[in-house]
Amino acid sequence: MKLHHPTDLGKSIVRLFQEYLPALRGLSQHTIRGYRAAIVLFLHYLAEHTNHPIEKLNLSHLTAEYVAQFLTFIEETRGNSVATRNARLSAIHTMARFLATDNPERLAEWQRILALPVKRGATRTPIEYLEKAEVKALLDHIDRSTHTGQRDYAMSCLMFNTGARVQEILDLRRSDIRTDPPYQVRLRGKGGRMRLCPIWAQTSKLLQHLASTEPDGGNSENVLFRNARGGKLTRFGVRYLLHKYVVAAATEVDTLRTKRIHPHSLRHGTAIALLKSGVDFATISQWLGHSCLNTTMVYARADMDIKRQALTQVFPDVLSASSFVEFALVEADLVKWLREL
C-alpha cells in the first residue's frame, strides 16, 4: 500500500495490516480480508460524513460517535443483520486495540470505542445441512465421465468426508494427501493451525486418480483442485458448482428445494453425522478444527433426530410409576406421541 503523503491514520492502518494482524496476532488471510472489508466500509462512511477524502482522514476523525453512527447506518440503511453489525464492530475493536498501543496519546478515545457493546438479541439462523439421501442425490448428479466432473466428485466426497472448511480444501496440495493406510489429509486451519483428518479408502482412491490424470505429471507441491486454466479454484467457484449440483438434485429430492445450501453446509452435514454416530464433542471439535468446544456445541441444537433421542432418555419410565398408572393408561397415545417427536 503506497500513500503520497500518508496521514497518521494512513500510517497506522498500514502497520495494522502489514505487521500487527499477520505477524503479531497470527491471523489467517481469510480473517484479515474480513477485517479489511469492514474497515474499508467504515472509512468510506467516515469520508462521506466528515467531507474529507479517505486519503485526508486522520486519527482525530476516528471517534466513538462516528463508529456508533456507522453501526446504525449499516443496520438501518444497508439492511445488515445484527450478526453482521457485530462482526463489523469486532474489526473496529481490533483496530482500536492496536491504536491504543500504536498511538497511546489518544488512549481515552480508543477506550470509548472499545466500550461500544456488541448488540444482543441476534436470532440464530437454523443450521442448514445435507441429509444422507440429499448427499447421495447431489453426488449422483455429478457427471464423472469428464475430468472436471471427476474433480468435482472427488472434491465433494472429500468435503463430506472431512467436514473441512472450503478454503482448507482449496489450499490442499498433493503432498498433503496420504494415499496409503492410514488414509488421511493434512489440513491448514485458521491461524495456520495444522491438523490431520482421516479419510475413507474410497476417497483416497478418488484423489489418487485425480492427481494421476493431471497433465503436469503429478507434481506433489501443486494444489490438488484446479480450474480449467490450471489455476487454483476459488471459494466462489466452489459455491457456483455446488449450486449447480443442488439444483439438479432437487428435481429428485424435494427437501433440497427449500434449503439454502452453501459450501459450509457440507461441513455442517459432517458434524451432524458424526454427532448422530455417537462421536463425542471433543473429538468432533478436533476433527473440524474448532478453537473452542462451544462452537461445536451448536450442532447439538441443530438436529431434530438428536432431540428426539434425547427426549426418550429424559425420565423414560416416570409415567409407568404406580402413582401415575391411571394417567399413563388414559394418556397412552399422548406418551407414545411425545416419545416419537
Image (cartoon, helix red, strand yellow):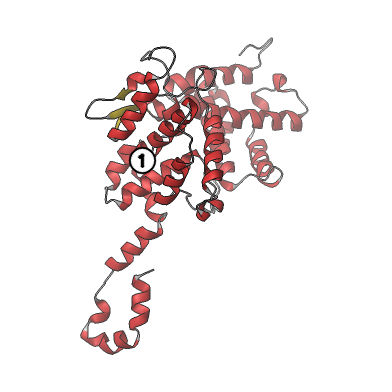
- Check the image and report above or below for 193 versus 135: above
What residue is shown at x 48% (from left), y 35% (from top)? 143
> Does 242 sit left or right of 337 as displayed?
right
User: In which image quadrant can residue 184 be found?
Assistant: top left
The front one of 134 and 61 is 134
What residue is shown at x 24% (from left), y 81% (from top)? 320
Q: Quadrant of the C terminus?
A: bottom left
Q: Which percent across, then down, holds residue 130?
A: 44, 48
> Does 195 sit left or right of 62 as displayed?
left
Residue 111: in sight, yes or no?
no
Q: Which residue is mark 1?
A: 292
The front one of 22 and 166 is 166
Q: Which percent across, then down, holds residue 151?
A: 45, 28
Looking at this rendering, what residue extends furthest in the right direction?
Answer: 51
Q: Which percent across, then down, holds residue 165?
A: 43, 34
In this rendering, the count of numbered labels is 1
- Check the image and report above or below for 240 versus 128: above
The front one of 38 and 156 is 156
Looking at this rendering, what residue extends furthest in the front direction?
Answer: 145
> Does 338 sit left or right of 86 as displayed?
left
The kind of residue on which mark 1 rests is: Cys
Q: Which percent across, then down, holds residue 301?
A: 40, 55
Q: Quadrant of the N terminus?
A: top right
